[in-house]
Amino acid sequence: MTRSRLAEYVDPVRILPRSCDHPGCAGSGDFRAPRSKTALHDFYWFCLDHVRAYNAAWNFYAGMTTAEIEAEIRHDTVWQRPSWPLGARVGALYGAKWRGFGLFDLDEDRPAEAGAPARPRSPIEKALALFDLVPPLTLAGLKARYKELVKRHHPDTHGGDKAAEEKLKEIIQAYSMLKASYFPS
């Protein structure tokens, strides 16, 4: 179908020019401006001269107290999304054993099988258990697991919890031991 034939079937869209919303102005309203700070998606349409005057006089914080202005600025720094202090949303499951829910863990105090004596574990075995790794190890895998555990157990993410600080110390000591025994320099 040719262009001229298409024009017969489709009415062209007619765009009428808007007039300026400023009283007494006969200019074309080409520029939009919000009606108020509570209706930011409802607009006035102004000509260039009147939108410049409107923008120069616009004050979003007009009529607000200093505390309200500071609260609005603080709310804008996070793009009007809720935020929490670091470590506040860790929850009650911190420290829970997810892998097997503790059923398959070997502890020094609990026998591995009913009636069997507790199996002594070497420091290297304890470090591997802490990192949840099995040999053979790669340096990249060890470092990745170390970074993951440090992020998870860092005291700053738990509000300065002393138990998290002790766990982090164990992780650092275990990492040093594993690195020295598997990857001596």
Image: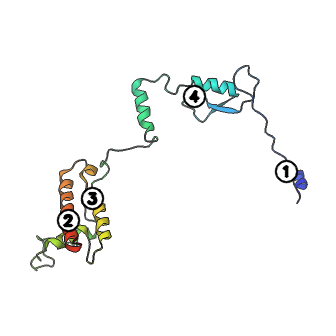
Rendered position, 51 above or below 156: above
Q: Nearer the viewer, residue 68 or 53?
A: 53
Q: Residue at x 32, y 69 (%)?
A: 140
Q: CA distance from mark 1 to mark 3?
A: 66 Å
Q: From the image, tell me which residue sits under label 3.
A: 150
Q: Which quadrant is home to the C terminus?
A: bottom left
Residue type of the residue flagged with mark 1: Val
The residue lying furthest to the top in this view is 24
Q: From the image, tell me which residue sits under label 1.
A: 10
Q: CA distance from mark 4 to mark 1?
A: 39 Å
The residue lying furthest to the front in this view is 185
Q: Which quadrant is home to the N terminus?
A: bottom right
Q: CA distance from mark 4 to mark 3?
A: 49 Å
Q: Residue at x 46, y 40 (%)?
A: 80
Q: Residues within 10 Å of mark 3 (few under 14, many from 20)?
A: some
Q: Residues within 10 Å of mark 1 (few under 14, many from 20)?
A: few
Residue 145 left/right relative to 9 = left
**Tag 2 and tag 4, C-beta contact below 8 Å:** no
Q: From the image, tell me which residue sits under label 2.
A: 176
**Mark 1 against mark 3, which lies toward the viewer?**
3
Residue type of the residue flagged with mark 3: Val
Residue 84 left/right relative to 17 = left
Residue type of the residue flagged with mark 4: Ser
First in sequence, mark 1 or 3: give its number: 1
**Mark 1 against mark 2, which lies toward the viewer?**
2
First in sequence, mark 3 or 2: give its number: 3
Residue 70 left/right relative to 93 = right
Q: Quadrant of residue 55?
A: top right
Q: Report x, y in % for residue 50.
A: 67, 24
Where residue 36 is drawn, which disc sits there?
Answer: 4
Q: Nearer the viewer, residue 67 or 49?
A: 49
